[in-house]
Image (cartoon, helix red, strand yellow):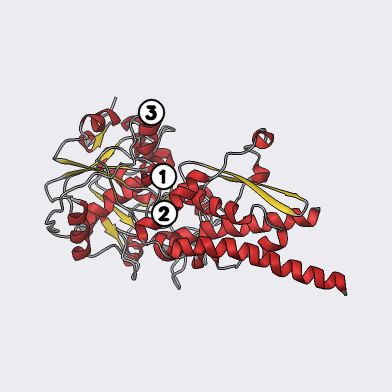
Amino acid sequence: MAEYSNPDVLVSTDWVAEHLDDPNIVIVESNEDILLYDTGHIPNAVKVDWQNELQDQLVRDYVNKDDFERLMSEKGISNDHTVVFYGDRSNWWACYAFWTFKVLGHEKCLIMNGGRQKWVDEERTLTKEVAERDTTDYKVPGLNESIRAFRDDVLDHLGSNNPLIDVRSPKEFSGELTHMEAYPQEGCLRGGHVPTAKNVPWARAANEDGTFKSADELEAIYKSEVGLKEGDDVVAYCRIGERSSHTWFVLTYLLGFQNVRNYDGSWTEWGNLVRAPIEKP
Amino acid sequence: MCILFYFLRQSKRLKFNIMNKLEEIIEQFSDADFQETLELLLDYSEDLPAIPEKFSGELNKEANRVPECETPVYVWVDINNNIVDIYADVAPESPTVKGLVSILVTAFNGVSPEEVESAPQDLLTRLGLAQKLGTRRMFGLGAVYHRIKNEVKNKAILQ
């Protein structure tokens, strides 16, 4: 039975329950729904909203260094803190926040396997009480954009035969839908996928209870079936970069790939880009 | 002629009623800062009445699902004596959607279908939700709003 490449990056709900008051840990909840944390959350957990706090409010981008420093300081997160992320929808948004924190240079990040769903299903304590945290003087040590792909990188990728993984649903991949089934929020003018991309829906890496599949199961999907190799230069994309951050996490930390990038522009950029090549069956 | 005046007067009165209810809700939100807006929405989501027994048998029927929304939202519209009664069921994992549905139930229940139809198209903007929750969240919420209005309209036509 194979082991995850970096098993230490995942912690269990039991582990989190034992570390609620650990001063070296900050538990961060990141959800699609902005109110979900407020209905009850893990004691001492801090809320980080992907849209209002991690994204720039004017330009389509993430917050800049100064804004991230301000955000982290206000949340009471220091450079030395280990941040444990959890969230809704099989940890999509936790992986998204994890990836964004990594881009913005935060070093110690972990994921609580199973996310919010598992914690709730296990009937563990939830509270509406927001813990007071002392502010910090956070400093971004340096950005890490090597895990982020931009549209020109994807274009270059096409010419070099490097693997491109489209983690959207089969209907989005085929171009039948330009959004996830029942998610009409982000429109695209064209349907289909980036030429050469292979379709591996993100959810294949998740169990019903929101946890990640075992290393053996993940290897069977990404290595045996899709043919990816650990040294490959891989770019993953979806619709806005959130589902692909889940796959980025799986390939990088659970399977030990060294060169995986998340294309956060994803289909909402590519499917609207003039003259971008598109493949459709 | 008398009848016509009666209807005109009625429709003015009715419009005044729903606008009163909506204005009251809009005022609540316009006075609220970001955190207060979340708290208000959360209060509304917690106040959404449970589905009455008579509907519980059909809870998961796709016919009552709002298909445009990512969250499972089920809506039943009842119209008796030209008075609207809406019941809705929304997953607890989606309190934002649940909060909006609860606002609509509060505003629309007890008024006529015509009044529901007269509710402003840009209600969500007037509530200031787009500015506070982020524009990307508005599409799904907008879909819920228009679906509920349409459900009321369609039900009224069938009667």
The answer to whether A26 is drawn above or below residue B25 in the figure is: above
Residue identifier under label 1 = A202
- Quadrant that contains the C terminus of chain A: bottom right
Mark 1 or 3: in front is 3
Tell me, yes or no, whether the two marked residues, 3 and 2, touch with CB atoms within 8 Å: no
Q: Residue furthest right?
A: B1
Tell me, yes or no, whether the two marked residues, 2 and 1, touch with CB atoms within 8 Å: yes
Tell me, yes or no, whether the two marked residues, 1 and 3, touch with CB atoms within 8 Å: no
Q: Which mark is residue A238?
A: 2
Is A219 on the left-hand or right-hand side of A270?
A: left
Which amino acid does the dot numbered 3 rest on? Glu
Which amino acid does the dot numbered 1 rest on? Trp
Both on one chain, marks 2 and 1?
A: yes
The answer to whether B152 is drawn above or below residue A130 in the figure is: below
Residue density around tag 1, few if under 14, some if 14–19, many if 20 or more, within 10 Å: many
Is B102 on the left-hand or right-hand side of B116?
A: left
Residue identifier under label 3 = A123
Image location of residue B76, percent across then percent down: 66, 46
Image location of residue B75, percent across then percent down: 63, 47
- Mark count: 3
Pick whichever of labels 2 and 1 is earlier in the sequence.
Answer: 1
The answer to whether B40 is drawn above or below residue A15 in the figure is: below
Q: Secondary structure at mark 3?
A: loop
Residue density around tag 2, few if under 14, some if 14–19, many if 20 or more, within 10 Å: many
